[in-house]
Image (cartoon, rainbow, N blue to C red):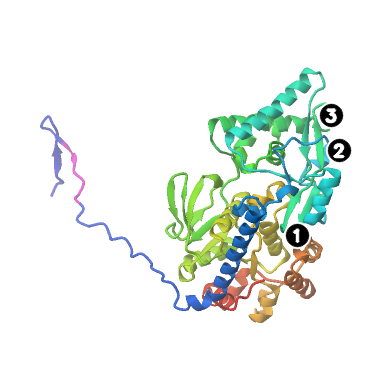
């Protein structure tokens, strides 16, 4: 039988009609429902005690600040008070005795140098006698950042008109200018400064890159948009040559202006992920992280556009690797034991660190970390807690104090009878890194961390989180984590 044909407006015969589909669309698959675990109250009892203790501490700190006549904001807990001189104040003239090419470069041998340690009282003493300051940046809006850039431009113009060339005064981010403050449990930037002169042959190119970045950032802020580091690089490839050149200058610009790096509106690509019992508005759009699929929600680089954060989570689970994160996301671990699961897929990026710091401060719930049992897992954890040396000037908004090390710890290898074939031998470089960490102030202040790290170096054994899969693919979510939580086994 020939196919039916449609009649045209002129009475002719058109092309054959498509066969009518008698099949209906299949119904959507039933939504997977994961209820809270029957033993949730028992498992989370110790975690709730930790949460209540943290909230009491924050409340007591707020009362103390109010009684002292200061602000009662929660952020005061992390402030340097009168010890810190904000970078927005007019800097004093400092004569640098070292070459600015090395003093202003935050990447020079940062990982090898031991961080110097000063207490708050020592900083106060230094401030009152020598006029020393600590460089701490503050949150600024686009207008304030543009005004800061314009002030730098005016100074450059004045120097050029006086036929002096021009030079930039930039706080040093070198290893020797990094200071760990035990009371704050984070690394801050010292008072050393360096100059970057356009008339100096060795510094002229770096000075040109810095002024070009100032110009481009100002243009971005005028448009009220955000760009990526890669976008910035491609605006002037001939000058920058390599993206690391433009990336490194961004931190210099932030310290010069006195703002956070995110205030420059130049961000890195998405890296971190979050899933679990948290919701918020992102640039006006409502985000519920329990309804973002198995993979969860990418942590946006525009943290300033997140508002109205709400959560009924009992704790935050900070996971080093994406593989372990995906296991917890697929098993809906956050539904069985109400929590928020976050990962930066290894070395944490700025957006993930800032997001964690913000939600922890607002929700006031404990953070438990699950990292590999090796020196690098502990190093990653210390970056979340105490900050990185390269961005110590912004440590107040990038650090999350008092993160608890839940696992995988060196003592867990024997306690959970991890098979020998799942234990890896540490390399010479691993052992060297472990010994270097034992000398760092932010490690030595926690005796239990020191004990675990010493055990690791002595046994020369390390293990990944995935090694627990030797007991079963879901062993981490069904046995290991519930037992750890129930026993309050964190340090």
Place of residue 322 in the rendered image (x, y in percent of width and height, measured from the top left): 57, 61
Residue 366 visible? The answer is no
Please report whichever mark, 1 or 2, sits nearer to the chain's N-terminal start: 2
Identify which residue, 452 or 30, lies in the foreground: 452
Which residue carries the number 2 mark? 96
Place of residue 16 in the rendered image (x, y in percent of width and height, measured from the top left): 19, 42
Identify which residue, 399 or 88, lies in the foreground: 88
Q: Determine whether, in the image, residue 387 is placed left or right of residue 340.
A: right
Gap between marks 3 and 2 measured at Cα: 15 Å
Q: Are marks 3 and 2 in contact (CB under 8 Å)?
A: no
Which residue carries the number 1 mark? 182
Which residue carries the number 3 mark? 200
Instruction: Characterize the local packing of mark 2: few (<14), some (14-19) or many (20 or more) Cα atoms within 10 angstroms.
Output: some
The residue drawn where x is 71% and y is 40% is 87
Please report whichever mark, 3 or 2, sits nearer to the chain's N-terminal start: 2
Please report whichever mark, 3 or 1, sits nearer to the chain's N-terminal start: 1
Q: Is residue 189 above or below residue 242?
A: below
Residue 123 visible? The answer is yes
- Was residue 64 drawn as part of the magenta stretch in this picture? no
Identify which residue, 184 or 427, lies in the foreground: 184
Q: Are marks 1 and 2 in contact (CB under 8 Å)?
A: no
**Magenta residues?**
14-20
Q: Is residue 328 above or below residue 107?
A: below
């Amino acid at each position: 039988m020939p196919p039916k044909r449609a009649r045209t407006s002129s009475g002719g015969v058109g092309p054959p009609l498509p066969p009518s589909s008698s099949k209906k669309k299949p119904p959507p698959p039933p939504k997977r429902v994961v209820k809270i675990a029957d033993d949730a109250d028992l498992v989370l009892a110790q975690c709730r005690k930790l949460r209540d203790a943290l909230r009491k501490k924050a409340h007591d700190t707020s009362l103390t600040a109010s009684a002292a006549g200061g602000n009662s904001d929660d952020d005061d807990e992390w402030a340097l008070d009168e010890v810190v001189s904000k970078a927005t104040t007019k800097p004093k003239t400092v004569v640098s005795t070292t070459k600015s090419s090395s003093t202003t470069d935050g990447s020079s041998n940062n990982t090898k140098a031991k961080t110097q340690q000063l207490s708050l009282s020592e900083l106060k003493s230094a401030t009152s006698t020598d006029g020393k300051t600590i460089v701490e940046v503050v949150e600024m809006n686009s207008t304030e950042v543009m005004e800061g850039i314009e002030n730098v431009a005016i100074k450059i113009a004045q120097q050029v008109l006086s036929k002096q060339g021009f030079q930039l005064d930039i706080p040093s981010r070198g290893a020797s200018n990094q200071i760990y403050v035990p009371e704050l449990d984070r690394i801050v930037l010292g008072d050393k400064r360096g100059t970057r002169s356009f008339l100096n042959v060795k510094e002229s190119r770096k000075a040109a890159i810095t002024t070009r970045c100032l110009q481009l950032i100002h243009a971005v802020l005028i448009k009220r948009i955000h760009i990526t580091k890669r976008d910035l690089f491609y605006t002037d490839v001939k000058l920058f040559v390599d993206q690391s050149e433009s990336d490194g200058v961004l931190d210099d610009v932030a310290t010069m202006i006195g703002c956070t790096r995110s205030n420059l509106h130049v961000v890195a690509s998405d890296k971190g992920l979050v899933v679990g019992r948290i919701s918020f508005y992102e640039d006006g759009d409502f985000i519920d992280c329990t309804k973002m699929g198995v993979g969860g929600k990418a942590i946006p680089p525009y943290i300033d556009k997140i508002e109205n954060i709400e959560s009924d989570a009992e704790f935050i689970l900070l996971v080093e690797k994406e593989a372990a994160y995906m296991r917890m996301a697929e098993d809906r671990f956050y539904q069985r034991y109400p929590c928020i699961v976050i990962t930066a897929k290894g070395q944490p990026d700025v957006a993930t660190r800032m997001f964690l710091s913000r939600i922890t401060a607002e929700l006031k719930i404990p953070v438990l970390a699950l990292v590999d049992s090796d020196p690098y897992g502990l190093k990653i954890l210390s970056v979340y807690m105490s900050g990185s040396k390269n961005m110590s000037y912004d440590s107040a908004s990038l650090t999350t104090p008092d993160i608890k090390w839940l696992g995988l710890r060196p003592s867990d290898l024997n306690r959970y009878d991890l098979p020998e074939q799942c234990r890896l031998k540490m390399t010479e470089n691993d052992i060297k890194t472990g010994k270097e960490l034992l000398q760092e102030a932010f490690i030595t202040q926690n005796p239990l961390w020191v004990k675990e790290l010493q055990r690791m170096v002595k046994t020369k054994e390390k293990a990944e989180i995935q090694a627990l899969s030797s007991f079963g693919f879901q062993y981490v979510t069904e046995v290991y984590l519930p037992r750890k939580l129930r026993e309050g086994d964190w340090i």
